[in-house]
Amino acid sequence: MNSAVADAQRIRKEDVVIGGFTLVRDKQRYTKPQVKEVLPHWISSPVTCSSDLSKGIRVKKSALLEKFLVKNLRSMGIKRLFPVQSTVIPYILDFYAGRAPLFFGHPRDICISAPTGSGKTLAYALPIVQLLNSSSVHVIRAVVILPVRDLAKQAEETFKRLIASTSLRVVLLAGEGSFASEQQEIYFNAEGHISPPDVVVCTPGRLVDHVYNTPGFCLEHVRFLIIDEADRVITEEKQDWYNVFEGALYGAMHLSSSKDLAIQDLVRSHPLPTIDSQCTMASCTLQKILLSATLTHDPGPLKRFRLNFPRLFLATSLFEDVSSQTCLAPSDEPSKVTTEEDRIVNKYTLRFDAYPLPDHRNVKPPISVGGASTGGVGVFSIPSGLKEFVVEITDHHKPPFLAYLVRKLGHEKVLCFTNSRESTKRLAFLMSKFNGLQARALYAGLPLPKRSRILKEFGSGGVQLLICTDAVSRGIDIDSVSCVVSYELPTSTKTYVHRIGRTARAGKTGVTYTLLLHNQVRHFKMRLRFVGMGKVKNFPFHASKLRPYEQDYQNALSELKKSFQVSCALPSPYLHLRHFQYRLVLVYAGLLTRNYRTSKVGGAAASDLNE
């Protein structure tokens, strides 16, 4: 009976042909199962540390750093290690002191995602300087890659201050000087003796140039590769620099010519999944360290770096202080050192001299292990002392609002970002015509001496308003920036994170204002909530507060008009074009709406020309 009922139900569900026509029965609807993204374990379970910079440990209480580093830090005015530093530094040093397990004969690679201004540079510079100082052989052992020249110069200055009173040498290869002068710095030290540098700080393109064109530029003994602002370096991929670096790293053209037996014993090899490599340390290890405030959560782009069992360190505001934890995950607990022989380093295992550390550390870094609740790297890191505001405003009121920030709210150093170089130059010219307001433009096309002079004037307080492009939004450390303004809608959430990271650095407080049109506010807040940044607030503001600055604004527009007429003088047949260009200037200044269009010159929208 049951089979007959089942057959009848099956027939009712099947299609039948009647008179040459197919009668389609009711079809059961089904939904396609959603494929869930499965991130690698090292991304989904990071080692977390607090983004609150007040929770670090004091430098003088640290048992990890040698005395010369403590002295140099004191001369730099640094009295406290920030959480990301007190977490990463012991993790790096443990591998070279025999207290952490190796993976295929190499130390684990490290990825760090922490807010701008949280001390990422010192997190890798301190342990590297300490380890390199224990070696008596001077060859290039650390390469630091940064995307732009300004960041490279900043990192080089940090290294130089840390290596004071040591024999270590650091060289900057970023195009600041001529190529020939950089070659001289590679070959000779300050006394004129032949001495290779210990640390090379460079941009990707300049590194490739020296690999191909500088004889004797040997990278075969490099022990550390640091990629700062890694997401930008990955995106740009200048001159296929990483493959060129690996070719120089694992090459043999310079090794046979070396007369130093200690160097000849170093045989470079990739980490291989063999029993022998798991039991012994490689003759010459390489550890990669990647850093960024917006490190990608997509493991695909990171594959090209061939990371060896990477470990992710994530600074988050969701952190809870767990003082009983150590800086290593439970699965990564270091092996205990029981005998004196275990501390002795032979020529086949470790090239850095072992240094004694207490078996029981008095101060433990404020971190917790795991990161399921933090959302992994997909959640961008921002400073904890930062207040974020959205200002709903028209284009016409944007320039007076900048004057309002300086004169009324008392912000002495305002960093204002635009989306294009042309907008930067025009806005800086306009704001400089406001009575009693000093404004300058900063963008990538400026010569380096002029950029340095402008930054110096801004840092000393001679310039109150610095208008710049996003070339300045990454890593540049400008002292005491109290306020950051996004004059236009940021092109991406990542761009916004790097912009606001120019203030509230090193544990200080700061405020940011994003100037948006009415129809941009909702979209902007949705984008921030999507990545877990929902604390941005509306700034209580009314246009009537800008009336005291209206006359200055009109005078500035008149000056802008005169300047533009002089610079854009055209023959009479092109007067209509000159008039159109002047209208565009007013659009840039915010006097006209962005809906203005013309059919005389290609039918282009004025807002499109702002890109």
Image (tube, rainbow, N blue to C red):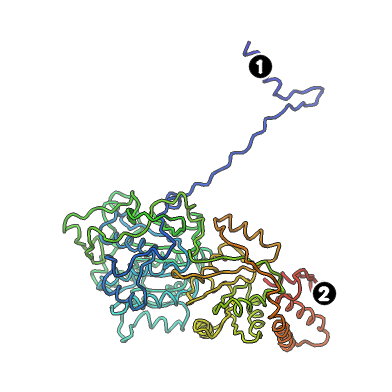
Q: CA distance from mark 2 to mark 1?
A: 74 Å
In terms of depth relative to the viewer, which is nearer, 107 or 610?
Answer: 610
Identified by mark 2, the residue type is Lys
**Observer-nearest of 213 and 529:** 529
**Residue at (73%, 79%) from the top-left corner?**
585
**Can you name the residue that lies furthest to the left here?**
340
- Between 82 and 199, the residue placed more toward the observer is 82
Q: Considering only vertical position in the picture, is 207 above or below 281? A: below
Q: Which mark is residue 363?
A: none
Residue 501, image x, y percentages: 51, 68
Is 530 in front, or is 574?
530
Name which quarter of the figure residue 404 lies in. Answer: bottom right
For the N terminus, the quadrant is: top right
Please give the residue where the numbered disc 2 appears in the rendered image: 600
What residue is at 56 percent from the left and 72 percent from the top?
A: 484
Q: Which secondary structure, mark 1?
A: helix
Residue 131, percent across and down? 29, 68
* Image spot of residue 367 (x, y percent): 38, 57
What's the mark number on residue 7? 1
